[in-house]
Image (spheres, rainbow, N blue to C red):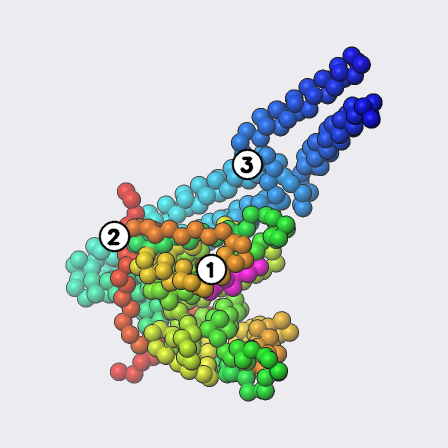
Amino acid sequence: MKKFSGMIVIGLLALFIGLVISIQITTTQGSDVGGLVPVAKAQGYLEQLKQVRAEKDVALQELNKLDERLNQIEKEKSDEDFFLKGIVSDLEKYKMAAGVVDVKGPGVIVTVDDPIPTAEFSDEYSVIMLRYELLLSLVNKMKDAGAEAISINGQRIIVTTEISLAGDNVNINTVPTAPPYIIKAIGNPETIESTLTIRFGIIEQMKSYGLRIDIKQKDEIEIPRYSGIIKYRYAEPVVEEE
Amino acid sequence: MKLRVLGFFVICVVVGFSIIVQARVTNGQQLYVSAKTITDYETTIQSEIEDKDRISQLIDETGKRLQEYEALANNGDSELKGRLQEERDYYKMVSGMTAVHGEGVVVFVDDGTRDLYEGEDPNAVLVHDMDILTIINELNRSGAEVLSVNGQRILNDTSISCSGYTIRINDQFFARPFEIHAIGDSKRMAASLIGPDGYGTLLQDYGVIFKVTIKEDLTIPKYSEEQSFEYMTKAEEEE
């Protein structure tokens, strides 16, 4: 027996080394979907994302500048004219209700991310994307708790906002989105949080799918405007008879 | 015997070395990420690009309006006044404070009347808030512009929630049956609901009563109260 014990040890070691080598080889094959991808490649995407976001910020600043000048004209003119002042202040009010201005206020930020991959929840598909109706329900519960403005991953929720599974993506306002989902809501932070975290409530329901959820109350959050152009092609105002 | 010990030592060195290399390369962070992370990145990038494009469109539009205003402001106040009034009326309509009419669909949903199977959950034939929400979501997906449920105009912050036997919309209570009115491309909206994969078809399969009617002219009332916001204020740009 003693004669073979050394060979068994060497055999085990050889097995171990072989395993290490084979893992190395399979993981570095990388780019094919389904396998693992080197982190360096992910970093490339991160850089690209940063760049696109920077470009978007530049565009937003340009838009803000234009808006500011428009407001200036409106203000100048309305200072001269009382009647015009009424129109401009009404316009501001309606625009805010329509969701076409950036707003800020107290509220909550909810982050929803897919489960950590395990045997039960594989990372082949996204749980939250398949169960996008959970997002729909979450938003509805926030509105129920009195949220005044809501956005998901920067997309402002307005009347006609759809959350739909289109191919592999969840589209919100026709813009494709991917997890993690960051949902911001302006309103009474305590009311919103307790509405969501009530026992057997929406957060518990989401957690039962293994989703990772984080809720934070904030004194001030900013929610961007609806970035599309609202244009009615079918609806027309009813002319009111005086 | 000596030779074997030596061989054993060499192997130990190699294994130890490879472990050290592994540990150092990972450097505390994950060395490999899953393919899903990459597709998520790709989608997010795509999303930001589309958002940026939409913002450029907004810039174009705002720029045009600015030029128009500047021209009108030079021509005298009355023209600018007219333009601003137009603008105000438009956003009044968008925010739900003006009644609107146009082509659209009427969706009628009611609790099913069929007998239940042995031991079946009665919820299967009842209409819930999630059903109404999903129908509205489907209608929005197929291009609805203005919506109402049982005559209540749906606003940006309208919630629809079950509370016992009734459904609460805009803080008013409604009971079955439910009638959802939507103005928009009527054929597209109807088709999306009653198609083979449509949500209406699914409800019908459960035994819930579900009907869609196409209307040439549909009127949706305005929101009946004042809208006021307690928490949100306009975000000012930093200088």
Which of the two labelled residues, at mark 1 and mark 2, occupies the earlier sequence position? Answer: 2
With respect to residue A54, does B159 lie above or below? below
Q: Is residue A19 magenta?
A: no
Mark before the other along the chain sequence, 3 or 1: 3
Residue A72 numbered mark, or none: 2
Amino acid type, mark 3? Gln
Distance between the alpha carbons at the discs numbered 3 and 1: 33 Å
The residue wearing badge 1 is A204
- In the image as oriented, which residue stretches furthest toward the front? A1
Q: Position of residue A51 (x, y in %)?
A: 48, 39
Cα separation, mark 2 vs mark 3, equals: 43 Å
Q: Nearer the viewer, residue B47 or A209?
A: A209
Could you classify mark 1 by the number of other residues whose Cα lies within 10 Å: few (under 14), some (14-19), or many (20 or more)? some
Report the magenta residues as a range: A130-137
Chain ID, mark 3? A
3 or 1: mark nearer the eye:
1
Callout 2: chain: A
For mark 2, give the secondary structure: helix
Q: Which residue is mark 3?
A: A43
